[in-house]
Image (tube, helix red, strand yellow):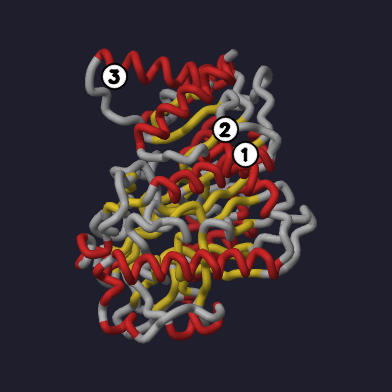
Amino acid sequence: MRLFLVKIYLFFKYRKQGVKINPFSLLKELEESQYWDRNKIESFQLQHLNKLFSYSKKNVKYYQQDKYKNISSISNFEYFNKNFPALSKENIKDNSSILMSENVGKRIKHATSGSTGKPMTIEISGLAEAYRIASRLRFFRWWKVDFYDRNVLIWRKPKQKSQIFSLLETIKIKLLGRLKLDVFKLNKHTIFYFFNKIEDFKPLYIRGYKSGIYELARLMDINNLQFKKTRLKVVVVTSEILLEKERDFMEKVFKCKIANEYGAADGGQFSFECPNGTMHINEELVYISSDKNSNAYVTELFNNGMPLINFKNEDRVKLSDEQCSCGRNLMSISKIEGRITDYIACKNGTKKHSLVFVGIFNDIEDKYYESISQFRVIQNGNKLKFEIIASENYSDKVESLLELLVRQEICDSIDIEIQLVEKIQREKNGKLRYFIKKG
């Protein structure tokens, strides 16, 4: 009965949003296409890439510019990757009105987080939204759960507008089997409330910001809390880079596997991790390429509402065509390296990607086990400020080693400040970045 009500609710919800195609029907297609051979997958992508470009030249003013006039069709991906003009975030911000299709009805709006600058609003077609939803439905099936199974979402809670809105939200949560917990309210004082709410709810999976779920695991570990009534099948982390040290720790606390998801409001659902540990690209709905510097270029194949063709999304990724033992023939992302703006700059001209901090803190952990629980680095001019949540084995020796490694791995002329904190402040959107550059 509940499943029937869920599908009725989702049907009307999606229709109201402008999604006219049932994502559950697309799910059936995606569950078959993930096992297509590589030639069929690439042929499908190329066919829909050409359809999107042909449509855009006729209906989107941006693609009627001179730089696109000499491109009649895309013969292969090698040609596309080398010759098709890249679309930057600046292009989108400056030309958002002429990137809109003139012949698409209701669009679905998605706002980027703005974590590296001014937020953008992207408007996508109903079909693109349906494929986004269907790809997530498929992902949960990989882990032997359905997205409407009992679950906990650790996210930011929207401001409640009225009592009626609050009542409707409560009904929706009950119907979808979801307990939504506010990541901003998770701390050492509320951990028992969070833990007991989850235990009483008995979810099959937890999903949310990686940093929020990691904080839940950290506080559970400190307070010797273990789930007894709850038997999790998977914990899904999103929106932030997952470090292997964090994965291992969370798997130990939650006693289940951690699954990573990677996507963006401005490009769709890019990649999901299967139980075999491979980050499969949703190739049926998005085409992704990368250059020699690992810069990612994405095209959401069914978004003719606001086509973003060959969009350089400012992420760095490494792609792989290695066959996964799960049998799916979708290409994968072997490494997500973060944003292209995430680099440390020294006054002597030295530049290092912020991933260097991962290596530094791993080296510290190898020598002084359980000394640092969490960290964030803020660069302001020639100064690096380290905010550190200390663990039981933290000492002055850890600080000395940190300073030594920073000067060895980055540069010896940079100023260093170390501040011990009980909690690291989140962004307004609820995310927590481990490196912030202010100047």
Q: Nearer the viewer, residue 209 or 140?
A: 140
Pointers 2 and 1 in contact (CB under 8 A)?
A: yes
Label 1 to label 3, Cα distance in Å?
A: 28 Å
Query: Where residue 221 sits: x, y (%)?
Result: 59, 33
Q: Nearer the viewer, residue 377 or 258?
A: 258
* 385 to 346, vertically: above or below: above
Q: Which mark is residue 165?
A: 3
Q: Residue at x 63, y 47 (%)?
A: 29
Q: Residue at x 36, y 41 (%)?
A: 430
Q: Nearer the viewer, residue 170 or 209?
A: 170
Q: Nearer the viewer, residue 150 or 69?
A: 69
Q: Quarter of the image for the N terminus: give it.
A: top right
Residue for badge 1? 140
Q: Quarter of the image for the C terminus: give it.
A: bottom left
Going from N to C along the chain, the mark reached first, 2 or 1, is 1
- Label 1 amino acid? Phe
